[in-house]
Each structure stands twice: as C-alpha cells, then as structure tokens.
Image (spheres, rainbow, N blue to C red):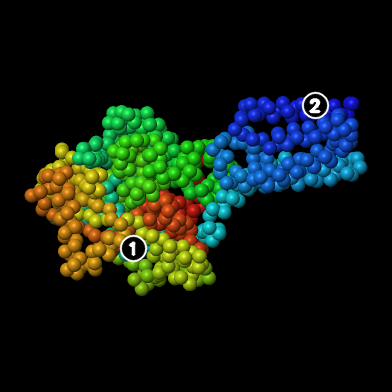
Amino acid sequence: MGHSSGVFIGLALSAAVLILRVALRPDRFSLMGFFTLAYFATAAVWTFCLHTWLFVELSGLLGYGALCIMALASLALKNPYTYEVSKRDYPEVYWSTPEFFEVNALLTAIWALVFLLCALVQLLPFPLKLASHAFIAVGIVASAVLPKVLVSRLARRLAPAYSSWEAPREPKEIIIVGAGIGGLACGALLAKRGYKVTVLEQCHQVGGYCTSFSRKGFVFDGGVESISGLGPRGPLRYLLTELGYDPDELFVRTEDAYVIEGEWVKIPPDFDRFVESLCEKFPEEADNIRQFFSEVREAYREMYKEVELVGTPLPQPLLTEVLGPEYLLRYPEEHPTFYRILRSGETLKDALDRYFKSEELKKLLCALTAYLGTKPEETLLSSMLPIYGYYIDGGYYPRGGSQALANLLAQAIEGRGGCVLTRHKVERVVIQEGAVKGVVANGGLFEAPIVILNTNAMNLIDLVGEENLPPDYVEHLRSLRPSVTAFLVYLGLDVDLSERYPPLIKSLDDEMGIVINSNLDPSLAPEGCSSLAIVRLLPPEAYDYFGERGTPEYLEKKRAFADQLVALAEKLVPEIKGHVVVRDAATPRTLERYTLNPKGAIYGLDQSANSPERPYFKTPVRGLYLVGASTFPGGGIEAVAISGIIAANDVSGWPLRKQ
C-alpha cells in the first residue's frame, strides 16, 4: 500500500489542480492538467480495482511515456502544452503573435524528445536511470535560452535575405542621389560623423517637394503645408538637435480649421482642448471620443519610444539587429497598445465604426488621411497614428518657407566639407561584382563605396539596370504603384488675410485645402498682401488627363482646372475675388518634372493597406541604400527624414544615444 499511495496522492492533487484552474479560468483549456488527471485516474483503476502494480513498478517509464504522448498530442492539436505554461510568464499582448506560437511549438517538441529519452533510460539499471535528471536539466535550459534565440532568428527572417551586407567602413566617402529631405537628412548626419558627402540633384535647387519659389515678391511652397515630428520624441527634433540647431527657433506652430457641411470647425492647438472641443460638439459621443484618443495617444507615444535610443522609430526587422533580441522580446510588453494595433491590421474606417455612430464626426476624424493620400477604408489605423500626431504634438512650418529647411540641411553638409551639386542628373549607378562603385551624372563618373538613392523606387530599375538585380526584386519593383498626385494653384493677393483666416483650411465638402503661408510668416508676401495655395489631391490616373506639357490641350485643361479651384476657394475666402495679382499652377506633370516622381506622385508610393510592401532601405546591391518616401515609413517630411536617419545610422554603425 505504501508504494501505491503515490498513485492516490497524484490523483487527488491532479484533480484538485484541474478543478481550481477551471474555476479560476473557465475560458482556458489545460491539456496538461486534463492529461495528468487521466493518467492518474488510469493508474488508480489498474492499481486499486485490478490490483495490478504496473503503474507502481514502471512508474518512471509510464510517467515519462505519458508525458511524451501528451506533448506530441498537443502539437497534433496545434495547442503546444508549453504555450499554456508560457502564458503565465508573458503578458497577454504576446499570446496571439505567430512568434509566440512558433517558439512554443519548438519547445514542446524538445520536451517531447526529453520525455521520450527519460522514459527509455528507465529501462536501464541504476544508476544509469539518473540520466533522466540530466535530460530534464537540458529541457529547462532550452526553455530559458531558446525563446530569446528563436525570436531573434524569426525577426531576422523579416528582413530580406539580400540585406545582410554591412556598409564598408573605409573610405568614408558617400554619394547621395537626390536632394530631397530624406537624402539631405542622411547626408547632414553623415557629414557630422566624419564622412565626405557629395549630393547630386537634378533640379536647380534642393528640397524635392520641400521647396519654395517666388513670383513678384510673393513666396510659395512647392507642396509643404505642415510638418510633424517636432514633438518631445520627434525624429525631426532629434535630427536638428544633433546637427546643432534649435528647432524652436526654426519653426512656427500651424493652426487648422476644417469646413464640414458648410460649418467652420477650428482645431485647438492643445490636444486635450481639441478632444474636449469634439466632446462639446458631439456630446452623445463624448465618452467614446475620450476613449478613442486616449488609445491613440498611448499608441502614438509607444510608437516613438525608440527615438530616445537611435533618433527614430524602427521597423521590426531592425529592432533585433540594432537593439538586440532582449529588446524585441520586451517590445510587446513595453509597447502594448501600439503592438496590438499594429498586429490587428485594423483600418481607420473599422476603428471609427467601432467607436462612433456620428457620420459627421467620423468624416472629421478622416480629414488628415489627405496626408497619406488614402481612403479611410484603405488606411491602416497604425499608419494614422503619426498623422494623428498633428493633433497631439502639433504641426509646424519653417520660418522663411519650406526652402529654408532644405537649405539648412544642405548648409549642414557643405559646412562640414561636403558638396551639394544641383543640375546634376544621375544617369546610372555603376556596379561591379554586385557592389556599388559610384554613379554617372552629367556624363562624369563620381566614385564612392556607398551610394544612397533618394529617389522613387519605381526608378530603380532604370538607374541600376535590371541585369544587376535579382529577378524577384525586379518583379517586386514592377509591382509598385505611385501614390496620389495633386493639382496646385498659387495666388498672390493684394490683401492681408492674417486677421481673418487660419493659415490652414481643409474643406471636407469640396475636397481641397487652402494654405495661406503668409499667415504663418508675413515675410512671404509684400506688406499688406498674402501668399496662398489651393491644393486638390488627384489619383495617379489624372496624370494622363492633362496631356503633354506645353501643348494647347495641356494649357487649356490646366487653366480650366485652376479656374474651378479658384472659384471653390472664393466661397471660403471671398477676398480672393478681385485681388489676385499673381497666379500660377502646377499639374501632376509639373510635379514629375521637378521631382522625377512617376505620375507626379506626392507621397512616393501608394500608401493604402493593400498596396505592395515598400522596398527595404538596403538594396540587393552591396553599398546601395534607398531613402525617401519609397521605403520605411513612407511619404511626408517627417517620414522621409526618418528614412534618412535610419540609413545614416546604418552606414555609421548605429551609434546609440543611450542604452
């Protein structure tokens, strides 16, 4: 009876544990608990009812054998038994991730092997049976070490296999193709870190879309109206601070008003006041408004945590490479709200439908999708988080116009021995034995072991040559689609609008924006006058509507489209009528001419949820990088600056700000 008491005690304990677990968590099935109870129940029947001592005399063999069967059964049922055990040690945000399941499936397989080996050594004489303790120790060590190793390897799988090359450390020479903000940001950081930087730009001035031009004393912006990324964890703030500038002296805070159903809705610059203003306007939705923006703000702050370490948010493949597997393991726990939103794949429309009933409110909260060029039903909520940052941390405008920001970054390069050459169109990238050697521009060869392309990825094949790229990479590039384009009308008025209108007006009724940049900086217009732009986003197909530049058809359609937008703008700003002293316009073909973006794309590539994945920032050619709107994280001044910071950090070995 002494030997059989263990069976009875095991049965009682396993039953008690299973009952307690079901009582505490009735929603969670415990395969191990159920299997343990079944094993001891079977042992009890054999021992006490059939009076057979099999389960006593062969307890080691049968016990370990049963555990092996249990582990294998859990794998067959796609519910690895270590999955349930691991849930006790990891927060719930981890449980639904495929990495969590894959790691536990492997650990369960390892334990199945351990149990099998332990069962087999029970057939050996003493003291060889003690080898089972060594096997158990191996299983424990594997459970402690393997999650970190496996998660790291799983994360590295997210980065393309071709991106495993490292940038050469010598010579410290860099060529940057394209002087958009992504290229200039990258070049300015590298120049500060001791690299000899040469920037080649096909246009007559730097900046890409972040440029300005003047007509009769009026200054207009090429496309920028408001810039994000200058908050407490803003990547642009980090960039400018590292370069030795004070962002607060360089920018002025923007102010917005929306027009919806004929009503003007002013957007308070303070985030909490903005939320409360929505609650006052939509009192029946107040609780949901506060809850929605509480979640948005929390996720937004989490999204930017890595700025404190490396100056920028990071895509998942870089988290392990830059910050280590331990950081990646902690990531879901330390970024729970953002991680949940990211993994959910929820669209903005779905999120707004889940929170709100008012269609007017939902329309208002979709206003800023214009900064992505996507429809609410095709916009990921995770993509909207940095856009909602305009409400949380504010939007800003460069003093002196957007050209001032581009010029500042160019001067940061030239002031540290670099060279910025305009009117230098790069014709091709020179490649030898799979590595970049330089570029050809204006018929001359510029040599460097590292070339950074600040260009639309759709231009890569022509620049690099299809023969120098893997077939699957070429296929991916050919699948890319351009983002939306735009039509802009620039007006110089002989009337001062600064006391009557906010600088940024977004008409949700007419699907257009009005930017009065002289209201942000009076120096952009003659005294008593105003500079403004009217903007209408267009699908890429509109590129063909206007016909060939310079033809009578093109000029007529350009004039007629501008007339339509001016007439719409006059309904919101009546002072336009009779006060226009300067007028100009830009079509999608104009935008393509100055930036080389196919179809005049203003955000590089299509940013909708179902669009092809953006190319990685490292290309299959050793030493050849991609920055700008075509890579992580996408279009917009802040976003392209992030891409430039990432490339600069990778070239210079990822200097961390703090550990």
Mark 1 burial class by Cα count in 10 Å: few <14, some 14-19, many 20+: many
Residue drawn at x 34%, y 31% is 285
The quarter in which the N terminus is drawn is: top right
Q: Is residue 432 above or below residue 652?
A: below
Q: Which residue is mark 1?
A: 598
Tag 2: amino acid? Ile
Percent x, y for residue 428?
Answer: 40, 70
Seen from the viewer's position, the closer of residues 291 and 35 is: 35
Q: Element at badge 2?
A: helix
Task: Tell me the distance, in whole angstroms, between the alpha carbons under discs 2 and 1.
Answer: 75 Å
- Residue 137 x, y percent position in the rendering: 76, 40
| Residue 249 seen anywhere in this rendered image of the structure | no
Q: Which mark is residue 463?
A: none
Farthest-out residue, left: 578
Q: Residues within 10 Å of mark 2 (few under 14, many from 20)?
A: few
Which one is in front, 272 or 422? 272
508 to the left or right of 156: left
The numbered mark, 2 or 1, whose residue comes first in the sequence reads: 2
Report whether residue 26 is seen.
Answer: yes
**Residue 179 x, y percent position in the rendering:** 34, 58
Give the percent coordinates (x, y) of residue 207: 31, 56
Residue under numbered circle 2: 9
Q: Residue furthest right?
A: 125
Q: Is residue 306 left or right of residue 395?
A: right
Query: What amino acid is at disc 1?
Result: Pro
- Direction front: furthest residue: 49
Secondary-structure class at tag 1 = helix
Q: Is residue 585 left or right of residue 437?
A: left
Numbered disc in front, either 2 or 1 = 2
User: What residue is at 39 percent from the left and 49 percent from the top?
Assistant: 378
Residue pictured at 34% horizontal, 63% vertical: 598
Instruction: Give residue 615's quadrant in the image.
Output: bottom left
